Amino acid sequence: MTRKDQKFYIDWWNVRKSTLYGGGAVIVLALIVGGFSWWSLRSNFTAQTDASQTPQDAGRLVSFEGDVRIIRASTRETILVTKQTYVSAGDTIQTQGDGRATVQMIDGSTLAVRPNSTVVIRDSSSIFGGTNVRVTLDGGQINVRTEDQTETTQNVVEVMESENRLMSQTDASFNTNPETNGGEIRISRGGVESTVGGEKTLIGENEFAAVNNGRIVTKEKLLGAPKPDGPSNSSQIISPDGRNGADITFRWLSPETGSALSYGLQISRSPFFISDAIVVERDSLGNTNFTLGNIAPGIYYWRTRAKAASGQMSNWSESWKFTVVKREVSQAIEANEWRVEQVGGDIYIITGRTQPGLVVRAQGRETFASGDGAFRLQISSPAPEISVEIRDEKGNRSSYALSLRTGAATKRY
């Protein structure tokens, strides 16, 4: 080996580590981009619906999540929805336990298909300035919202031997009830003209009707859904010392409309409340609270609904999320470089530094410490001194008494 070759050999081995790491990162990034591109092309994810292939008077599926399928009437082909597409007369929309979809119909109405539902688009046509929209609910639940409609517009929902013509400016919910083998209609705004067995019945705002055996068996004031009250949405609950789980009391407010006889409660590990993910399900609760002991660490979702003396069930309330965290060995949380700036009146900006990612909370407001530990929080307080709490995801926390006059932390507790 010549001296020149030897020098080249030594220089090659003196490549910096950062260069090697950078090269490796580029290769990994290229593999990820290439893999995504291959998947996109294979699943046709990025392709847009060709307007020339969209049938005339078709509705547009404007949003979806989870498992949503469309059965085309023309081909009987079942399509797993992966992008925005269309639905036309004769098509069937099916959602699984984690699926939901929203369709913009040709008359401007919005059709929201809930999980575990099957809906058939019977008609979607326009002629002489008017539109005809007709859907059949074969199972599950849908919500329909109409805007202003002309006299030549017909928007009809069929459910369990009933035909329900929606008026302008209406919010309505339709569902099938497997327990009674009937259908239910809820009107929160506007109204529908329901035809059952040749008889027409007007169901108005804040009214409920149940359909069974070819007739309307119940028509009464709508029972509203309860409102969750606690634990608050996105709250974090720390298990007590020496325990793996936590005891939690769930609270909710009575419905604003109607009178509730009892309540139902569901707690799930899935925001879709699929059957396999439901941890707790209770019916016939007589109070607006329920305590469950020793809930294991994890992320949960909960919701509630009301039941009237007549048997009417309200819709489920909005679902709230909470997290149970096991308390770890206490670790000191330090904060320094405190500074207080008065913006005007009782408004202040607090800055400081702690460990990256920690939550800083004061006067009902909170923020996260950035990558270098710095945090900035705007608060409002008429008092000269406030309490600032800093906590981590393991339940460790420290609190500081902070003077708004001097900007100094006067006490830690």
Image (tube, rainbow, N blue to C red):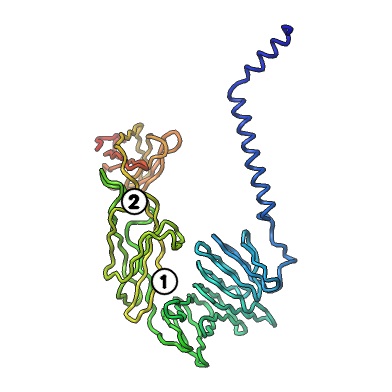
Task: Judge by depth and name the residue closer to the eye, 134 or 40.
Answer: 40
Question: Quadrant of the image for the N terminus?
Answer: top right
Residue tagged 2: 296
Task: From the top left corner, tell me how far across and down residue 28 is, in percent.
Answer: 62, 36
The crowd level at tag 2 (other Cα within 10 Å; few <14, some 14-19, many 20+) is some
Locate residue 120 relative to residue 286 in the image: left or right: right
Task: Judge by depth and name the residue closer to the eye, 400 or 357.
Answer: 357
Q: Residue furthest top?
A: 3
Task: From the top left corner, tell me how far across and down residue 344 is, in percent.
Answer: 36, 45
- Per the image, label 1 sits on a secondary structure element best described as loop
Q: Residue at x 39, y 78 (%)?
A: 222
Q: Quadrant of residue 409?
A: top left
Going by the numbered disc 2, the residue's amino acid type is Ala
Q: Residue furthest front?
A: 276
Q: Residue at x 31, y 43 (%)?
A: 327
Going by the numbered disc 1, the residue's amino acid type is Asn
Q: Residue at x 24, y 38 (%)?
A: 413
Q: How far apart are labels 1 and 2 at the CA level?
A: 28 Å
Task: From the top left corner, tell me how far across and down residue 297 is, in percent.
Answer: 35, 49
Task: From the top left corner, tell me how far across and down residue 89 is, in percent.
Answer: 65, 76
Q: Residue at x 42, y 39 (%)?
A: 357
Q: Quadrant of residue 335?
A: top left
Query: Any mark on residue 315, and which?
Result: 1
- Per the image, label 2 sits on a secondary structure element best described as loop
Query: Any mark on residue 282, and which?
Result: none
Task: Judge by depth and name the residue closer to the eye, 247 or 229.
Answer: 247
